[in-house]
Image (cartoon, rainbow, N blue to C red):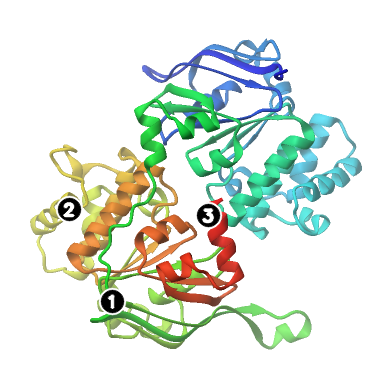
């Protein structure tokens, strides 16, 4: 006998001003069920979930959302406050912005318990520790006294889950709960949610664009495109026999390898031997008055990147991969041997020397999140042309504009497609288009090496595929060398010629992409590969 319907959504419509973004969506979630709402950014999945609790800002919402027979859309604000966090709880995408930075994690969980369970301060503090322990946080009593910035990404997400479970909800809304996490942490959070769901009997509404996560987690799936629910059914049915063209396109959007293969050889863009990066840290007690200790973030790394090739660096958060990239960009002091484009960085005291500035033109970077890496106050012309102002100051304004338009067209943003392109601002573009602007900004000064720091992790699967195809084409046409930093094994398989695997600052394994990922020797590498394939 199937479980009773917990939530019945009928004819849900959401409008901001004159623009309707959700068009008559219908779905139901049964008690104890794991239900996934899938779609790309802008499909309406998150705004649909937020609208159930009327958290979608100034949106005009119509339709019906029956939770155990009560229409959430007809409740007063006072009645809704009794539902939010009690009957229905929510986990947000980015815990660092959802948690209060001025309160300890334990105090934030205890606050929910005092408000929703009417526990005393002492009871709330003890129960908060127990909830943190139930989510697998080590040393929960000590971690309860920590502030969010003192915890890792996985621990912050577990603390968010503890807060959501504090009121024993019947329905948990999980909005992209693993997007910001490493692949192994994603698996752990999914297992945790599944375990807690079985223990408490709550239903889970998972909002995501990660199809691998949906396949591992959900009982049923609904697919949204541009505010319409286009397909729904069991997870097996949707993945094994998708009917709608959009669903088939989503499932087929896996990174494809299209790089120049062949033996190593030719000019070396980057070479490192015994590269070591350390940070000064205070010593405890009286010793800290007189000298500093050190934390070694990169411990003697050896690697090289020939022109026209890609080196992938794989590892979890804290492995040292981003620190290594910053040393390569001349942003951190290092010891050992590091040659970039046949030259070496001057020490930090000469950070802005003419030598370093000339070398910086040959090494550029594309960051993870294009929305935060592009200035919202600058136009596209100012963003893309900024490098030319610094490195080729003799160009006139008209010449810079001509080069900017040509570069933007090369990355797939043509003036004919986007009238007034150069006068637009970043917020007027989609995530994939913003990342293309970031690539244009890096390439306009004609670098030899591009550092790609998680260049697709903030993008939907179909947009991710498009950006990877762009990077592969540009590498073949321009002979670029890439240093690719990522925790996505599928992206490494598509892009990298060589791979190094890092953990706790050490290079555990290195070699050809097929060798390292196809036949990993180190247990840590095997765990990463298995987590990505699970």
- What is the CA distance from the residue labelled 2 to the residue labelled 3? 33 Å
Name the foreground residue: 245 vs 355: 245
Residue that badge 2 annotates: 410
Tell me the number on the disc at residue 263. Answer: 1
Q: Is mark 1 on a helix, strand or loop?
A: loop
How far apart are labels 1 and 2 at the CA level? 28 Å
Look at the image and tell me in which quarter the N terminus lies: top right
Q: Which mark's residue is nearer the viewer, 1 or 2?
A: 1
92 vs 11: above or below: below
Choose mark 2 or mark 3, whichever is in front. 3
**Left or right: 41 as drawn, with respect to 181:** left
Q: Quadrant of residue 235?
A: top right
Precedes in sequence: disc 3 or disc 1: 1
| Residue 240 spot, x, y in % from top left | 47, 34
Point out which mark residue 532 bears.
Answer: 3
The residue that appears at 64% across and 45% down in the rendered structure is: 190
Which mark is in front, 3 or 1?
A: 1
Pick whichever, 13 or 4, lies toward us: 4
Residue 158: give x, y in percent of width and height. Answer: 69, 48
Badge 1 vs badge 2, beta-carbon distance below 8 Å? no
User: Can residue 529 be seen in this snapshot?
Assistant: yes
Local crowd size for mark 1, using a 10 Å CA cut-off: few (<14), some (14–19), many (≥20): few
């Amino acid at each position: 006998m199937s479980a009773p319907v917990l939530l019945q959504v009928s004819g849900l419509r959401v409008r901001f001003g004159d623009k309707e973004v959700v068009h008559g969506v219908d779905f139901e979630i049964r008690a104890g069920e794991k239900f996934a709402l899938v779609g790309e950014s802008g499909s309406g999945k998150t705004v649909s979930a937020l609208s159930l609790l009327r958290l979608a800002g100034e949106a005009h919402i119509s339709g019906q959302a029956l939770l155990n027979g009560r229409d959430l859309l007809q409740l007063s604000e006072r009645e809704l406050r009794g539902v939010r966090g009690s009957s229905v709880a929510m986990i947000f995408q980015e815990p660092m912005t959802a948690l209060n930075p001025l309160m300890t994690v334990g105090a934030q969980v205890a606050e929910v318990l005092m408000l929703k369970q009417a526990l005393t301060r002492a009871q709330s503090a003890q129960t908060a520790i127990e909830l943190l322990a139930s989510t697998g946080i080590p040393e929960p009593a000590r971690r309860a006294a920590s502030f969010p910035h003192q915890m890792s990404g996985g621990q912050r997400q577990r603390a968010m889950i503890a807060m959501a479970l504090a009121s024993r909800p019947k329905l948990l809304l999980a909005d992209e709960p693993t997007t910001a996490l490493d692949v192994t942490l994603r698996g752990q959070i999914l297992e945790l949610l599944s375990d807690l769901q079985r223990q408490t009997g709550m239903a889970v509404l998972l909002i995501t664009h990660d199809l691998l996560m949906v396949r591992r987690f959900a009982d049923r799936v609904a697919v949204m495109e541009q505010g319409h629910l286009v397909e729904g059914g069991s997870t097996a049915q949707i993945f094994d026999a998708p009917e709608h063209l959009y669903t088939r396109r989503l499932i087929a959007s896996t990174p494809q390898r299209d790089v120049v293969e062949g033996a190593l050889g030719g000019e070396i863009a980057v070479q490192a031997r015994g590269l070591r990066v350390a940070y000064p840290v205070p010593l405890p007690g009286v010793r800290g008055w007189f000298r500093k200790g050190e934390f070694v973030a990169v411990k003697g790394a050896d690697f090289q990147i020939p022109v026209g090739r890609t080196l992938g660096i794989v590892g979890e958060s804290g492995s040292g991969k981003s620190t290594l990239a910053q040393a390569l960009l001349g942003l951190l002091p290092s010891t050992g041997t590091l040659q970039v484009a046949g030259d070496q960085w001057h020490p930090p005291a000469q950070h802005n020397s003419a030598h370093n500035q000339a070398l910086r033109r040959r090494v550029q970077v594309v960051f993870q999140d294009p929305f935060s890496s592009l200035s919202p106050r600058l136009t596209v012309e100012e963003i893309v042309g900024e490098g030319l102002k610094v490195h080729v100051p003799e160009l006139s304004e008209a010449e810079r504009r001509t080069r900017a338009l040509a570069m933007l067209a090369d990355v797939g943003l043509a003036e004919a497609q986007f009238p007034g392109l150069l006068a637009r601002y970043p917020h007027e573009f989609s995530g994939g288009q913003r990342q293309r602007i970031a690539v244009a900004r890096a390439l306009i000064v004609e670098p030899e090496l591009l550092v790609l720091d998680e260049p697709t992790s903030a993008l939907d699967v179909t947009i991710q595929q498009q950006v990877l195809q762009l990077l592969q084409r540009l590498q073949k046409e321009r002979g670029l060398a890439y240093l690719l930093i990522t925790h996505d094994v599928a992206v490494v398989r598509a892009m990298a010629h060589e791979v190094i695997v890092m953990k706790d600052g050490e290079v555990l394994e290195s070699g050809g992409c097929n060798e390292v990922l196809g036949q990993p020797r180190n247990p840590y590498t095997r765990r990463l590969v298995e987590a990505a394939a699970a």
